[in-house]
Amino acid sequence: MTELLLVEDDPVIVSTLSDFLRSEGFSVSVAGGQRQAMAQLAAGHIQLALLDVGLPDGSGFALCSAIKAQYNIPVIFLTALDDEISTVTGLDLGGDDYIAKPFRPRELVSRIRGVLRRSASAPPQLTLGPVRVDPVRCTATLAGKPLTLSPLEYRLLLLFLNHPGAVLSRSRILDEIWDLAGDYVTDNTLTVYIKRLRDKIEPDPQNPTLIRTVRGLGYQAGEAP
């Protein structure tokens, strides 16, 4: 049974919508705000989150960013804010759908099932510590915030993410980057690009923990034990 998380502080909406969703075959957990929602998500059983934008302890937009940074689950906004700016903001933050109140319950169920189907068929996002890459959209985020990378930096990061824990020699990286990017990359410029990538994703670029140097062998991606 699909487990939904409804993040809403209006008790009438919570009661009515929860009962309807359960009658449609969903299991529903409820949170009244951000802190309760993150506690529910930490249990690891939620498969989709329904978020109101206006919450008593913060914004649903901020909650969406936190969810997308830590959990690989879809998010649907349910909110009275139906202006274009709010809709675009929600989708840009990673929301999978945005439905304005009032809405028809059966339409909501149809949208939930559609999002779940797309989520199930989409390739999983790749993660490296706080870094998350969506290979379909070719986007990257760091702790939920957009990460600006050059095409070569993105390809380099993608190479490491596709080989977690593997030690990649410099010659192999050069071959892969040449094939993927079509750019002329020398051994010296590879060092420069590794440094640039570390500067953007490492908490302490001088002491890297996400992309580590394995002396005499190459580089290894993955958080150090």
Image (tube, grey):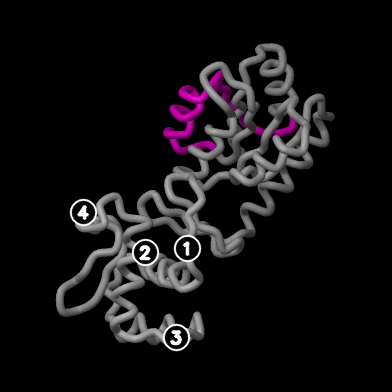
x and y percentages locating residue 57 in the rendered image = 51, 19
What is the three-letter code of the residue carrying label 1?
Leu
* Amino acid type for the residue under numbered disc 4: Pro
The reply to whether the C-beta atoms of the residues labelled 2 and 1 are less than 8 Å apart is yes
Task: Provide the secondary structure element on which disc 4 rests.
Answer: loop
Residue that badge 2 annotates: 197
Q: Residue at x 61, y 61 (%)?
A: 137
Question: Is residue 26 magenta-colored?
Answer: yes
Q: CA distance from mark 2 to mark 3?
A: 17 Å
If you read the primary sequence from the N terminus, does the residue marked by circle 2 or circle 1 appear first? 1
| Range of magenta residues | 23-46
Q: Is residue 202 left or right of residue 29?
A: left
Rounded to the nearest whole Å, what is the CA distance between mark 2 and mark 1? 8 Å
For label 4, the residue is 225
Question: What is the number of the mark on residue 149?
Answer: 1
> Which numbered disc flags the more N-terminal residue, 4 or 3?
3
